[in-house]
Amino acid sequence: MKLPAGVSTKDFNAAMAAFRRIVGEQWVFTSDEDVALYRDAYSVSWDEADELVASAAVAPETVEQVQAVVRAANQHKIPLFAISTGKNLGYGGSAPNLSGSVIVDLKRMNKVIEVDDKRNFCIVEPGVSYFDLYRYIQERGLKVMMDIPDPGWGSPLGNALDHGVGYTWGEFRDHFGAHCGMEVVLPDGEVMRTGMAAVPGAKTWGENKYGYGPYVDGLFAQSNFGIVTKMGFWMMPEPEHFLSCQVSVPRYRDIVPLVDIVNYLEDQGLIGNPRYSSPLDLMTLMMEPERVQADQELLDMHARPGGASAEEFEKYARSRGMEYWRVLLNFYGPKETVYANWKYAQKKLAGIDGVKFEEVESYALPLDEATKKKVHHQVALGIPNMSIFSIGARSRVVPDPQDGHVWLGSIISRSGEELIKAHQVFGKAVQELGITPAIVGPFTAPAYWVHRTFIFMVPFFVSRSDKARNAKVREQYVKLVELAAQHGWTEYRTGPAFQDVVAKTYSFNDNALLKFRTRLKDAIDPNGIIAPGRGGIWPKRFRGKA
């Protein structure tokens, strides 16, 4: 057990006794075995002195219990770190920013408060998982569809608060953007509601997110200004039909017109999330294990320091009759409408020399259970699952051992030219850092979960046995964050180990934004109780000491 900095054993034990009185003996966890469950399974500092670990955990069941826990923590100066389901793998899991913090595990707050399929919204508690909400909808035959991430064991509330994303229309796949009103326990234990949720008797909590006055909801995402205990979300009405079609282009620079046209289609509201990929990418190869044995030449191209050039990859693709880029376009709506939109999309894209079109899936909704199992990408239809963990062939694609990963996800402009620039910048850096196999290069497709911008994803693989490798991962990650910032790119989310360095890249006017957030923190949380360090925001009590 690692106690929080500046907290005595006497004060810690007094706080544990207070927590037990609030939630019951069985819902306070202090044994090594129990507390170990809150470690970051993908920690970049596993079993090292600076691994970020909790000292204990407390699991309240009601907002009143959360209030009481926060007040007791203030009395004994115990830092808290709230989680919903704690499944944020690749971005810190359940681990706190400050070692020794007590986890506030909200899994018992698992009520679906409301789902309305006429006005298309829901209100949920933090312990509700995507599986829970899906089950609630299906059991009642409600005609709404969730937007969900991979995998489905996470919480809509927790995912949104870390700016998590999904796969349908832009309005819904930005999960924080789709939220509507919240209930928050503030650092002094007071409860506040936002938007129309703040109006007693209002029926529009899940419909109008602003209400009147300053909009404060953003202060509670990726931050430490309170513990969110309820949240509303806009939901997508279940469409009559789903159509998924693939567009393939043969050359590297075809990505430029492809992106421009797909942007036009999405910004007109004709398509949902465009899923870009390349058969030349290692990550794609991981999802297609049947290709690994046949593609040793491609693996060898990636194994070179820095990987092969765009020209070499293009030559390889041409020799195999493969496309260089592909994008999956998803259409939702009446059958007549989705097919008309697909026809229009083909007309717009036909000017790209060598373009190919393929209809992949077409389903009338709602789906029966047998059909659900046939759907290739279930999350595009709001069906939560765990299939992301079935990715095979890792042993042939990434180095051993494979004990998890962390993601670097840089926000870049939604253009083919900017993607090519990112290939050049990150590709050169990977070569200089000696990272093999080449984890990024002229084969890296943009992730387009975040509406209206691309995310350039760089995976780093971590180990529970090789501390030297983890040290190198930490060093490489920070160097790429700093390099990205030099080009006006930075991360849309990251784990606790890197939140300080990422927060500092938003550096306009000598980090005026971070200074403002810090002033707010000191004003509303003078004891530094709520998640010290979350989002790079450190209270005065812990600044320079963590």
Image (cartoon, rainbow, N blue to C red):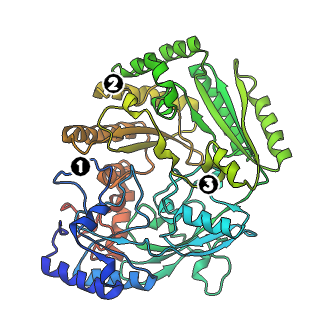
Q: Which mark is residue 431?
A: 2
Indicate the amino acid at tag 3.
Ile
Observer-nearest residue: 390 or 4?
Answer: 390
Q: Which mark is residue 383?
A: 3
Q: How many marks?
A: 3
Q: CA distance from mark 1 to mark 2?
A: 24 Å
Q: Is residue 2 left or right of residue 533?
A: left
For marks 3 and 2, the one nearer the N-term is 3
Q: CA distance from mark 3 to mark 2?
A: 39 Å
Q: Residue 162: image x %, image y %?
A: 45, 58
Quadrant location of the N terminus in the rendered image: bottom left
Image vertical order of residue 541 relative to residue 199, above or below: above
For marks 1 and 3, the one nearer the N-term is 1
Image vertical order of residue 454 relative to residue 358, above or below: below
Q: Is residue 52 left or right of residue 505?
A: left
For marks 1 and 2, the one nearer the N-term is 1
Q: Is residue 212 visible?
A: no
Indicate the amino acid at tag 2.
Gln
Q: Is residue 198 left or right of residue 19?
A: right
Q: Residues within 10 Å of mark 3 (few under 14, many from 20)?
A: many
Q: Residue furthest right?
A: 336
State the SS at label 3: loop
